[in-house]
Image (cartoon, grey):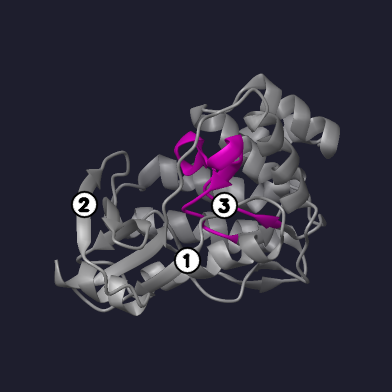
Amino acid sequence: MKWLKKALKQNNDLSSIQKVDRVYGGSINDCYYVQTGLKEYFIKHHATAPRDFFHTEKVGLSYIRQSETIAVPEIYGYSDEPGEAYLLLEWIAGQTSENTEVLLGEHLAELHQTTGDAHGFPTNTYIGLLPQRNGLYDRWLPYYRDQKLAGQIDIGIEKGVIYGERQKRLEKLLDNLSKWIPADVEPAYVHGDLWGGNWLTGPKGIPYVVDPSFFFGDRQMELAFTELFGGFSRKFYETYEASYPLGRTYKDVKLLYQ
């Protein structure tokens, strides 16, 4: 594991590696717990990572950290060199308390009350390994329609999994999206890939989020995504709603966002 020694050296950790354990759960990267004479780490490695893959994740984590709202692991280093791509992070471990999901709801609401100057993101990113086209837009609807949705539809057409009647129906949806999706909403800080596997409990029961696909946009899309796969309790949703109410439109747009 030359890339592992390189990662530790990048963090000025020249101590001996005492333990390396494989961490399972994700389907994209090879992940490991690493203990050295100085520190415990979590490291993700992808031998054939796309261009700027881990840099993109680093930037997303940095935006969330700078908001001073919801916790993210400290970033110790990264590389996007072919064959040696990695992201070196703080190891997060803790016991869930009865207050953990209350804090998760409160802190996510605080993140969503942090806003940017425009919708979208200045550079292209990834959702999983799929490229996500971006750009900065004055209004939410054109960004969501032309980049978030149309970009993924184009990938499906290119891969041959979207065609025929399905393609026609999706194109019709894009043409009529303005009937349901709000054009003007606050460009909130959005994690962008917040499912049950992308948050974890740290010391003192504090919730952390990981693996973002960060952008500025409609926070309702984030909440709809959390409901898609589960992993969030009623306590989380009640606390979020009490902290930053969603309003009447959420039920109307939830299925479209999902």
Farthest left residue?
1
- The residue to which callout 2 is attached is 19
Percent position of residue 193, x then y: 52, 48
- The residue to which callout 1 is attached is 75
Percent position of residue 108, x then y: 69, 44
The answer to whether 128 is drawn above or below residue 27 in the figure is: below
Q: Secondary structure at mark 2?
A: strand
Percent position of residue 135, x then y: 60, 73
Q: Secondary structure at mark 1?
A: strand
On screen, residue 113 versus residue 61, left or right, reads right
Q: Is residue 258 visible?
A: no
For residue 85, what is the image quadrant?
bottom left
Q: What is the C-alpha distance between the residues marked 2 and 3?
A: 33 Å
Magenta region? 189-214
On screen, residue 20 versus residue 105, left or right, reads left
Q: Which residue is drawn at the image coordinates 47% and 66% (left, top)?
A: 75
Q: Secondary structure at mark 3?
A: loop
Q: Is residue 82 visible?
A: yes
Percent position of residue 83, x then y: 18, 72
- The residue to which callout 3 is attached is 192
